[in-house]
Image (tube, rainbow, N blue to C red):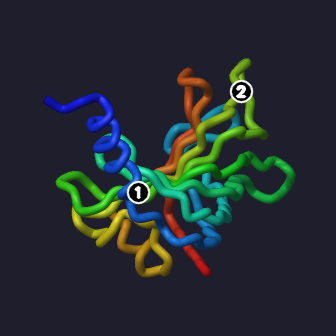
Amino acid sequence: MIRASTAFFLCFSEISMVAPAAAQSCTLNFTIEVTQGVGTIRPGTHLPGFAEFTTDGRSFRQEGGSTSHLATGTMTIGDGTGGEIGGEIWTLITTSRSNAADLVGVYAHRIEGLSYGGLEYEGPMALTLYGSPGSRPEAVPPTTQAGWDGLDLRRAFMLHAHGADMLAGDVLGLTVECS
């Protein structure tokens, strides 16, 4: 019979055994083609997007085999004419080497700049890139343009309004520079 202290140790050991991603900084430029609009943002509209983040080297396992990499930074969409929508990046989620699609998701919260019909679109806001199963050799964020380009199965953007509605679209172009 496993004692409670042994079970805790085994569980804690599993959580802490995740290899942390090295701290890195990346800048992402992308374009969103809106598929689900909000207010005057209609389907088919192209919105430029920008994100910059720095992972801090702290990573931990999450459910379903995903890994969270804590980060700081910002993500913004808009045309640069004062109608920007943006918030704080707080984590990147990765999966790799599974039977399901590999993914890298960049997640922001505390979103400001969009309200419509009494709803505040405060997030989360996510840029999620999917690759074929096994396309990511390890569960750390890519560091090269080629690594990000390999996530080409599906590229999605979404901004939620407390589960009541969302702005969504496809990511058409993505350029990345990491250091």
In the image, 65 versus 79, the foreground residue is 65
Farthest residue, direction left: 1
Q: Residues within 10 Å of mark 2 (few under 14, many from 20)?
A: some
Amino acid under disc 1:
Thr
**53 left or right of 64?**
right
Residue plotted at (32% across, 49% down)? 14
Q: Earlier in the sequence, mark 1 or mark 2?
A: 1
Residue 4 x/y as whole percent: 29, 29
Residue 118 x/y as whole percent: 73, 18
**170 left or right of 152?**
right
Name the residue tied to disc 1: 94
Quadrant (top left/top right/bottom left/bottom right) for the N terminus? top left
Quadrant (top left/top right/bottom left/bottom right) for the C terminus? bottom right
Residue 120's tag is: 2
Residue plotted at (52% across, 55% down)? 92
Residue 156 is at least partly visible in this image: yes
Q: Which quarter of the picture shows residue 123?
A: top right
- Rounded to the nearest angstrom, the CA distance separating label 1 from label 2 is 28 Å
In the image, 33 versus 164, the foreground residue is 164
